[in-house]
Image (cartoon, rainbow, N blue to C red):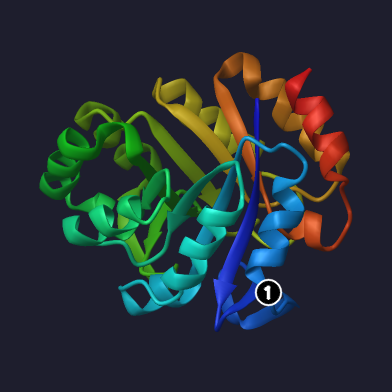
């Protein structure tokens, strides 16, 4: 099972939010590159980068930083946050990033179908949900679309991978939402990457147990920065 550390960038800093709330921001570093290099040194599968400014503004804001990271680390990089048109997707991929995470625009089925055909191996859909409902635009907008319904639509379009984040757990260190993950995996056969809530090694072990049900990986953020888990131990568990 893949282990994917997260680097969330806002204002040029590495930050973590609680439940996506900008007012509950903690700055962990003023150098996203140094943090990326720190995690990449563990021989990770991929680095997950979010341009939080981009997610809110609807366009990439910290892309120069991300390009520098992609050039200076050996592992693959995926980027999400404010990527909402075909031109930006091409720019991101041309900038050395391996995967583009589409969130808000995933609700536009025609757009998604088009980019899936053109960039099939480089597209990941990010589904961010709260109480089972999809959230968009940097988690500021609550849609009336159920996460499971959207995931089924994504599968029908041909999406290969979904990053699923339970916003109510993200940044809280309260543990992942095993129930919602299990429900999602029962409904679709797309590769699911779990994000949000990991607080300790027991949480990692609980997620590892879902590998038999189809869970393909986990994204870990705050637990690494707060040092409540050790990345080397997480990798050993997930790759066993």
Judging depth in this view, the residue of 100 and 137 nearest the camera is 100
Figure check: 67 above or below 131: below
Judging depth in this view, the residue of 221 and 148 nearest the camera is 221
Judging depth in this view, the residue of 238 and 150 nearest the camera is 238
Is residue 2 toward the left or the right of residue 79 in the image?
right
Image quarter of the C terminus = top right
Image quarter of the N terminus = top right
Is residue 202 toward the left or the right of residue 90 in the image?
right
* Residue depicted at 15% across the width and 39% down the height: 113
Figure check: 211 above or below 42: above
Instruction: Locate residue 124, reporting x and y percent.
Output: 38, 41
Q: Is residue 28 visible?
A: yes
* Residue depicted at 74% across the width and 22% down the height: 239
Few, some or many residues within 10 Å of mark 1 (<14, 14–19, 20+) = few
Q: Secondary structure at mark 1?
A: loop
Judging depth in this view, the residue of 100 and 144 nearest the camera is 100
Q: Is residue 202 visible?
A: no
Instruction: Locate residue 183, reporting x and y percent.
Output: 51, 30
* Residue depicted at 58% across the width and 17% down the height: 213
Write down the quadrant of residue 158 in the picture.
top left
Q: Which residue is mark 1?
A: 31
Instruction: Locate residue 100, reporting x and y percent.
Output: 37, 49
């Amino acid at each position: 099972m893949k282990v994917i550390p997260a680097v969330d960038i806002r204002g040029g800093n590495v930050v973590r939010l609680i439940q996506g709330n900008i007012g509950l921001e903690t700055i962990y570093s003023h150098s996203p590159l140094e943090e990326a290099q720190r995690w990449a040194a563990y021989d990770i599968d991929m680095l997950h980068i979010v341009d939080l400014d981009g997610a809110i503004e609807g366009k990439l804001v910290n892309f120069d930083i991300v390009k520098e990271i992609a050039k200076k680390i050996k592992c693959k990089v995926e980027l999400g946050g404010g990527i909402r048109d075909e031109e930006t997707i091409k720019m991101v991929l041309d900038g050395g990033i391996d995967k583009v995470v589409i969130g808000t625009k995933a609700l536009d089925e025609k757009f998604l179908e088009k980019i899936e055909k053109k960039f099939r191996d480089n597209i990941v859909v990010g589904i961010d949900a709260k109480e089972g409902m999809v959230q968009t635009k940097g988690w500021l907008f609550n849609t009336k679309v159920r996460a499971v319904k959207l995931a089924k639509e994504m599968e029908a379009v041909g999406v290969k991978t979904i990053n699923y984040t339970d916003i109510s757990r993200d940044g809280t260190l309260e543990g992942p939402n095993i129930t919602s993950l299990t429900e999602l995996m029962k409904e679709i056969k797309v590769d699911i990457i779990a994000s949000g809530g990991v607080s300790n090694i027991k949480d990692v072990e609980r997620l590892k147990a879902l590998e038999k049900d189809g869970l393909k990986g986990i994204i870990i953020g705050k637990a690494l920065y707060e040092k409540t888990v050790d990345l080397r131990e997480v990798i050993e568990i997930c790759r066993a």
